Image: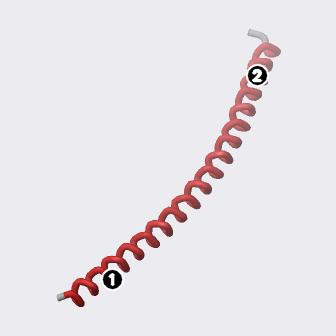
């Protein structure tokens, strides 16, 4: 194997590594954006769940007070 051939192989490997690194950066960026969206969605769902829980608890309290009034 000549030195020139070895240099070409090294250059090809470097090009491959640069392509892979670029793809990994893009993938990482997309994953971070997705994570951010999912965290936002989760926070919204937690808020909605808390609101629904509070409403159900209020209904239960009202029903209990009505039941006590009827007794």
Viewer-nearest residue: 26 or 66: 66
In the rendered image, which residue does mark 1 sit on? 62
Viewer-nearest residue: 31 or 44: 44
Mark 1 or mark 2, which is nearer to you?
A: 1
**Residue 29 marker:** none
41 displayed left or right of 30: left
Residue 21 position by quadrant: top right
Residue beneath the point at 72% across and 27% down: 16
Dot 2: element: helix
- Total numbered badges shown on the rendered structure: 2
Residue beneath the point at 35% across and 77% down: 59
Neighbour tally class for label 2: few under 14, some 14-19, many 20 plus, Cα within 10 Å: few
Where is residue 71 shown, x and y percent of the image?
17, 88
Where is residue 18 shown, x and y percent of the image?
74, 33
Outermost right residue: 4
Neighbour tally class for label 1: few under 14, some 14-19, many 20 plus, Cα within 10 Å: few
17 displayed left or right of 61: right
- Dot placed on the residue nearer the N-terminal end, 1 or 2: 2
**Residue 12 marker:** 2
Where is residue 1 shown, x and y percent of the image?
74, 9
Viewer-nearest residue: 5 or 52: 52
């Amino acid at each position: 194997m000549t030195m020139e051939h070895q240099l070409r192989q090294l250059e090809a490997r470097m090009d491959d590594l640069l392509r892979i690194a670029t793809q990994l950066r893009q993938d990482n960026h997309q994953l971070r954006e997705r994570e951010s969206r999912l965290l936002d969605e989760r926070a919204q769902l937690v808020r909605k769940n808390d609101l629904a829980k509070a409403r159900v608890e209020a209904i239960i309290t009202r029903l209990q007070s009505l039941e006590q009034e009827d007794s």
